[in-house]
Every structure is written in C-alpha cells, then in structure tokens.
Amino acid sequence: MVVDDENPDGHSPALRWPLRSCPCGTASPSTCEATCPPGHMQAGPCGKYSGCITLRHPIDHARRMRHLNAFTATAVLVLLTACASRPVSHPAPALSPAASGWQAAVTAIAAGGDNGGRGQAIVQRLDTLGIDWRRQDFEIDGFRGANLLADIGGPADAPVLLLGAHFDKVDAGDGVTDNASGSAVVLALAERFRQQPLVRHQVAIAFWDLEERGLLGSRAHIAQGSEQPVLYVNFDVFGWGDTLWMMTPDPDSPLTVSTRTAANAAGLGLTTGGQYPPTDHEAFLKAGWPANSYSLVDADEIAGILAMYKGDTPGQVPKVMEVIHSDGDTLAAVDPEAVARGIDVVEVALRNWDAEGGTTGAND
Ligand SMILES: [Zn+2]
C-alpha cells in the first residue's frame, strides 16, 4: 500500500482539491470523514483538521429554493408587465464557438453521471474528433479505475508535452467545476493542437480517474512505468473568473514567462506560485517529473482558498469553496466565455513555450 506523506497513517486517502471542502450534509464517507453541522463547512484537510467554520451564507437549499421561488414569481410579474407595455424580446447573446464547444463538452461529461459514464462522454468526444484513445486500467490502494490516454500529434521523435485533467467526481453535485471543466479544457486544447500541431513537441493527453480518492489515476500512470513527458500540465477547477492561477515551482520557468506574456496581452489576470491546492500535478512532482497546473478563478478568491487549505478561516468563503464538492457544483455556476478566454491564453502560452524550445526551467 502506498502511504501518502500527508496521510502517513494510511487511514484514508489524502483529500485532494477540493476534498478539503466538505459542505454540510453532502460529505460522504468516501469523500470526507468529518461532517459539519448545518450552516458550516469543514476548513482544512479532512482527517487532518476537523474544524468547522460558519458559512457567511449557510448552505440551506430549502431556504434557497424559497428565495428562488419568490424571486421567480417577482421576475415573471416584472416580465409580464414589461411585455405588456413593450413587446420587444432581448434573447441572450449567443455564446462564442469556443465557449459553446466547451460548454457542450462539460454538459456531456456531467450528464454521464457516475465516473464510468463521464469517461464514456469523453471517449465519445474523442471519437467525434477522430482521435484514437486507449484505456489504462489500474488498481492501486485497493481501488480499481481506468485512465483515458491519447496521442494528439506533433513531430516524430519530438519530446512529449502531456496535458491532463481528472474526470472523476465526488458523490455530491454534478462535478462540473470539479472537474468536467478541466477535462473539457483538455479536449479543447487537443482539438486545437490536432488542427495545428506544435513545432517542437508531440502533444499527448490524459484523463485521470479517481483523483478524488488520492490522485490514484495519475499515481498509477507513473507507477505503471509510463513514458516520462518533458512537461506535464494539469487542469483542475477551470469554470469562471478573471484570473488564471498557475501552480509553478519556478516563477522564471519558460512556461511561466510565456503564460505571463499571453495573459498580459489578453488582459487576463495571472497569479503564479508554488502554493496551490493539491491535485494531479503533485503525483508528477513527487516522482521528480516536471509539472504545472492551471485553474481559472476570480483574483479575490485565491487568498481565501489558500487560507482554507491551511485550515484558517477567511473573512469571506470563496465561491469555489462553496461550489466544489457540493450540490451547487452544476452548470449554473460556470461562465463559458470566461473559460474560452482562459483556453485562448493557455494555448498561446503553450505555443510560445514550444516555439522557444520548451525547456522546463526548474529541471534544466
Ligand atoms: Zn478536482
């Protein structure tokens, strides 16, 4: 049995991004050992910190529904009044193709239901794109799962850039932000790099199973003797926001620099650093394989997220910590146009990194 450093007693799999947020009443034994009383959520890693903090806006779905119903009734009245005097309709603006494509992929993955169905939705999308894929079955820590892998293309014998995201979810919610969002970003990038390959790298993609059980899919991939990529780039929690949040061990690495340039050019915020919620990039770093990870969030969420992962109580619970691992992790929470901007920036950053040689910085 592999024993995690963060969980040396082997009592339960280390809790991962965002397993440390366990909204009341939705935590199951498989995702969180501690359940907080109504109106609270757990701060800090389960099994490590057991403190419950008060939500500023307690998760009370019955009350939310009453408010929603009252709001809906008011809105209908206002609309009827407006329509009676001015029969002009204003349809919602159509999504851009990139936003629409990402939203369609996220919707399909979420509709898959359990992890097997979510994987099947990804496979169907790969089939539609004409991308050959393969299944990587694994058994680790007493759990069985299956990663999905594919080669996208690039110059023969060129070093491999691996892009990945976990597709599994916890029991609560639809697993949209965590992490159909990141899986759909990888699908979008795969489509782009298939249409226009990188110059100096082959691109491969991976969809990890059982991240929520302790990075099991990514750990198994490495443990099975898979080929080491020149760089692994992870995507987890990429659903809305004005800021790209990049986990990078080296603030001057080529990809960090190219991401900064691309974000600045696009007017997208960027926060970089080594402090970051645990997710699949950690399996790679632990093996000594270079890795980065991207999230998309609002800039003002980041300090609160980090505080909560340290077990501190922020003045305001960030949106992402209320959404993930809760019944609120649905399509309603995400912003496809914001995600499309984030995908564009990451694509430009990776193309520039590739064009300039694509070294990993910290390990070169
Ligand atoms: Zn996740």
Image: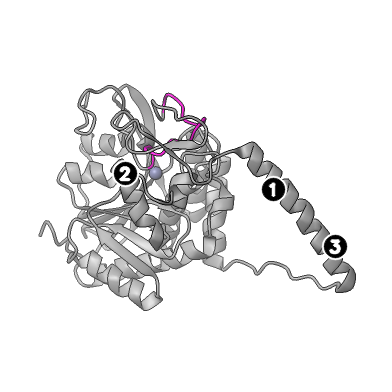
x and y percent of residue 188 in the render?
45, 59
Instruction: Tell me the number on the disc at residue 259.
Output: none
Which image quadrant for residue 362? bottom left
How dense is the environment of label 3, judged by Cα within 10 Å: few (below 14), some, or many (20 and up)?
few
Establish whether ligand 1 lies closer than 8 Å to the Cβ of label 2.
no
Specify the segment rendered in magenta. 18-30
Q: Amino acid at mark 1?
A: Leu
Can residue 199 be seen in the rendering of this structure?
Answer: no
Q: Would you say the residues marked 3 and 1 are in contact, meaning their CB atoms lie under 8 Å apart?
A: no
**Left or right: 20, with 100 as reference point:** left
**Left or right: 87, with 340 as reference point:** right
Name the main secondary structure of what is drawn in magenta. Answer: loop
| Label 1: element kind | helix
Which is more foreground, mark 3 or mark 2?
Answer: 2
**Left or right: 275, with 81 as reference point:** left
Q: Residue furthest toward the bottom? A: 265
* Residue pointed to by mark 1: 68
| Label 3: element kind | helix
**Left or right: 188, with 82 as reference point:** left
Q: Is residue 120 above or below residue 99?
A: above
Which residue is at the front of the view, 325 or 96? 325
Which is more foreground, mark 1 or mark 2?
Answer: 2
| Label 2: element kind | loop
x and y percent of residue 77 in the render?
83, 58
User: Reading the chain from its start, which is encountered first: label 3 or label 1?
Assistant: 1
* Residue pointed to by mark 2: 312
